[in-house]
Amino acid sequence: MTADSVKALGGTALGLVLAGLLWTLVVATGQFPRELFPGVPDILRAGGALYGDGVLVPDVVASLRRAAVGFVLGAAAGFLAGTVTSSTWAGRRLMQPMLRLLAPIPTIGLVPLAILWFGLGENSKTLVIALGVFVPVWINSHAGFASTPVEFLRAARCLGASRWHVVTRVVIPEAGPDVASGLRVGAAMAFVLIVVAEMTGTTSGLGYRIYQAQLFSQADRLIFCLIVLGGLGAACDVAVTAATRPLTRWASEER
């Protein structure tokens, strides 16, 4: 783990501490019922109860597995689509208009369709997450590839670079920061959509546990699961940032 990653995780932990202090002050005012605004000790006890019941760790593992599979599939498809729509005539004229129709559609609205197509199993959940990841990765990848300066391409061709070398040595490095941004947004979307995906047709996962806590008015459990989900999302963002640093190092060195 790099020093930047440690700093990012430390900042996240500090943010949680400050949020906990602010929450404690709000609860201490007594303006809100404790059933809806439980104190920090109550939230921690609820988390301990989930762990003691043996459901917390399996829920975390199940959610991470679904988010990871959806993220990988959506990110790969978005990257490939961005390459095609930015560099080929068919992609610009045929594929890009269709994807522009897909992009504004809320992914949550596709949940009923995914269930109709694939049922209540894992496939429908994977599809929902992958589609949510696909859109930001495609948009950012397309923007990055399409914005490569023409002068760079002409200079590479004048120096005798093949099409493969132009793509791998000029286009992809130039688009690296945009691709990395798309991957970070896609990772965040995976954790947003995992809650929606796990609310139907499953008996495990943080989304299912949040839905169950809402049904039984267990605000302490619900808030604890949200905190865990946020922590996992922050850790994954740090991981994606570290993994894509080779794509963005040149941009940071220019500043």
Image (tube, grey):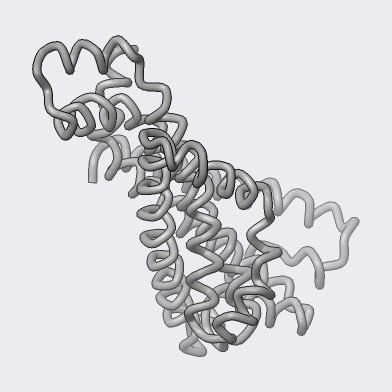
Q: Is residue 248 visible?
A: yes
Residue at the extreme right of the image, as rendered: 31
Give the quadrant of residue 209.
Answer: bottom right
Q: Quadrant of the C terminus?
A: top left
- Closest to the observer, 43 or 104: 104
Which residue is located at x 53 percent, y 49 percent? 135
Give the quadrant of residue 155.
Answer: top left
Horizontal side, residue 94 vs residue 159: left or right? right
- Closest to the observer, 232 or 47: 232
> How many marks are shown on the rendered structure?
0
Which residue is located at x 56 percent, y 48 percent? 99
| Residue 78 drawn above or below residue 255 | below
Which residue is located at x 46 percent, y 31 percent? 143
Residue 236: x, y in percent? 40, 53
Give the quadrant of residue 189.
Answer: bottom right
Residue 129: x, y in percent? 52, 64
Residue 160: x, y in percent? 9, 18
Residue at the extreme left of the image, as rendered: 160
| Residue 110 drawn above or below residue 250 | below
Which residue is located at x 33 percent, y 14 percent? 150
Horizontal side, residue 71 vs residue 167: left or right? right
Residue 211: x, y in percent? 68, 77
Q: Is residue 42 visible?
A: no
